[in-house]
Amino acid sequence: MTGADRVIIIAILASVVVAIIGTETAFASENRSAILWAEFGFGIFFLAEYAARLWSVAERPGPGSDWAKRFVWIRSFFALVDLFVVVVTIVPFLLPGAPILRLLRLFRLAALLKFGRFSMALRALGSAVIERRYDLFVTGALGLVLLLGGATALYWAEGKVQPEAFGSIPRAMWWSVITLTTVGYGDVSPMTPLGKVLAAVVAVGGIGLVAMPTGIIAAAFSDAMQNYRDRLAPSDDEGTMP
């Protein structure tokens, strides 16, 4: 990691801290000027970083003209993240008083996504998710089926007993979501024996539903990290003296 990377990381952390403490009304009202200057400074810094990356990407080896390389870079994920961070940081100063500014200020926390450029672990995790996207899609489809199936079953079993909670499938879906995710707030629960049996089936299915994507991502992440270690490790030929 270069010195410039360390400076960018510090700026990202500092901007996130400012965005967080800026939501505290008492602190923000007493230090409004300092917070505004800090936000403006971070906006200029991130804009300069974006411009520098856009200009320097032309120096990368490969076919194509300088502007063709820049156009390809602009469409990349991290370039879009950089541009988004610049926009949500600077726009509030260009449109003072707009109702959307509060939402834009919260979006400044998206600067944390910039860490993906510097973190090998985050890149490995992203690669793991992309590599197993079809497996995750299948588990997501199974989860949707179980979600709708659980809501339908409880609507059938409890709809007349608890019309406020299970009087329709959309109403029953709230219970189905919190049960499948093993949260179980307890604000809604079945009362009839049949409803309790069906709820038990849905709850047990929720355990498996949570475990499946977790296992898929964990295995893919472990493989990605092992491949990274293998690339770093010296080969047998390099370690053998002639």
Image (cartoon, helix red, strand yellow):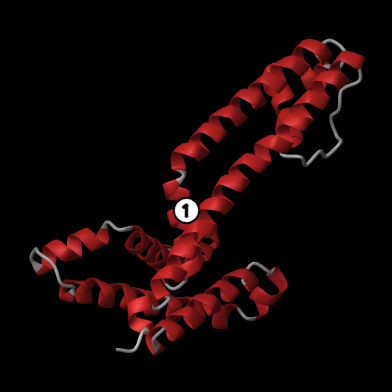
Identity of the residue drawn at 87% across and 21% down: 196
Q: How many marks?
A: 1
Q: Residue furthest front?
A: 242
Asked whether 190 or 163 is in front, the reply is 190
SS type, badge 1: helix
Q: Which residue is mark 1?
A: 128
Position of residue 72 relative to residue 58, above or below, is: above
Asked whether 210 or 15 is in front, the reply is 210
Does the rendering let one see residue 242?
A: yes
Identity of the residue drawn at 42% across and 48% down: 131
In the rendered image, which quarter is residue 76 located in?
Answer: bottom left
Residue 171 horizontal/vertical position (percent) = 72, 23
Position of residue 159 relative to residue 227, above or below, is: above
Position of residue 102 relative to residue 206, above or below, is: below
Position of residue 63 relative to residue 210, above or below, is: below
Residue 68 horizontal/vertical position (percent) = 12, 62
The quadrant the N terminus occupies is: bottom left
Asked whether 32 or 51 is in front, the reply is 51
In the rendered image, which quarter is residue 145 located in?
Answer: top right
Residue 166 located left or right of residue 125: right
Residue 42 located left or right of residue 209: left
Residue 37 horizontal/vertical position (percent) = 49, 81
| Amino acid type, callout 1 | Ala
Residue 162 horizontal/vertical position (percent) = 85, 17
Does the rendering let one see residue 167?
A: no
Identity of the residue drawn at 51% across and 60% down: 107
Asked whether 168 or 62 is in front, the reply is 62
The quadrant the C terminus occupies is: bottom left
Residue 11 located left or right of residue 200: left
